[in-house]
Amino acid sequence: MKVQRHSIHYGEHTIDFVIVRRARKTLEIAVEPDASVTVTAPLDVSLEAIERKVGNRAPWIRRQQRYFVQFLPRKPDRQYVSGETFLYLGRQYRLKIVPHTSTGVKLLRGFIEVQAPQKARTDVVRALMETWYRERARIKFSERLEVNLERFPTPEDFRPKGLIIRLSNRRWGSMSPSSRLMLNRRLIEAPLESIDYVITHELCHRAIPHHGPEFYHRLDRVMPDWRRRKNRLEKLMA
């Protein structure tokens, strides 16, 4: 039995699936309870034919995935107590709350150290960390924007007219019709290479607003390894 991993694009989504080839005549698509997708295919069917079939069934696949996701165990709510782990630029840091007369947040030898009043409430620690994350996001996203503009032959043609940072549960980034770049604050928790992927993806929308073949052809040219970067982002930040 030969097993192969593959993916296709459906709108703004990527559908990952496993191809299992068997001695059979028909092709079958199954969405498993963990929301993964398995395609059982005849030995001689081409990859192109499998992609077409998955693409045709993409609306059904997404509906099934949404149905199953609601039953998956959710991550427990953050407690914002010492010892809890948090991500910053793809690395895990332990939270260390230090009683102090002043407030502040800093990275220190594997820790995110929060200075806060003695027995500070959870909402106080959360607000301090969120402010710190936003400040770091503003600095780092602006730096990476300049780096990733250089991927394009004429960088200024792709420069957005503004940078907006906000928390979102729906998407990592977007480019508005008025050419304003929105980046999810949570991206500051991801590795630099994944931040670069999201920024470059959205910069490509300055020229091509849709997600058709032309868009992905341009993205392939300026960032050939974008699929690897995207997969790392989705696995780490799921």
Image (cartoon, grey):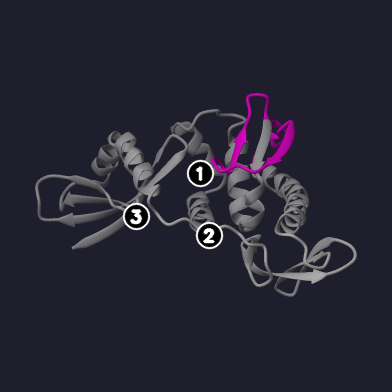
The amino acid type of the residue labelled 3 equals Asp
Instruction: Give the residue drawn at x 65%, y 72%.
Output: 83
- Closest to the camera, between mark 2 and mark 1, is 2
The amino acid type of the residue labelled 1 equals Asp
The local crowd at label 2, few if under 14, some if 14 to 19, many if 20 or more residues have their Cα within 10 Å, is few
> In what element is the residue under mark 3?
loop
The amino acid type of the residue labelled 2 equals Pro
> In what element is the residue under mark 1?
helix
Q: Is the residue under label 1 in contact with that under label 2 (CB below 8 Å)?
A: no
Separation (CA) of disc 2 from disc 1:
37 Å
Q: Earlier in the sequence, mark 2 or mark 3?
A: 3
Separation (CA) of disc 2 from disc 3:
18 Å
Instruction: Give the residue drawn at x 30%, y 36%.
Output: 60
Q: Residue 198, relative to residue 213: is it above or below?
A: below
Q: Is residue 153 left or right of residue 60?
A: right
Separation (CA) of disc 1 from disc 3:
30 Å
Question: Which span of residues is magenta-colored?
Answer: 152-179
Residue 135 or residue 77, whichever sits in front:
77
Q: Which residue is mark 1?
A: 220
The local crowd at label 1, few if under 14, some if 14 to 19, many if 20 or more residues have their Cα within 10 Å, is some
Q: Is residue 214 left or right of residue 88?
A: left
Q: Which residue is mark 3?
A: 34
Q: Which residue is mark 2?
A: 76
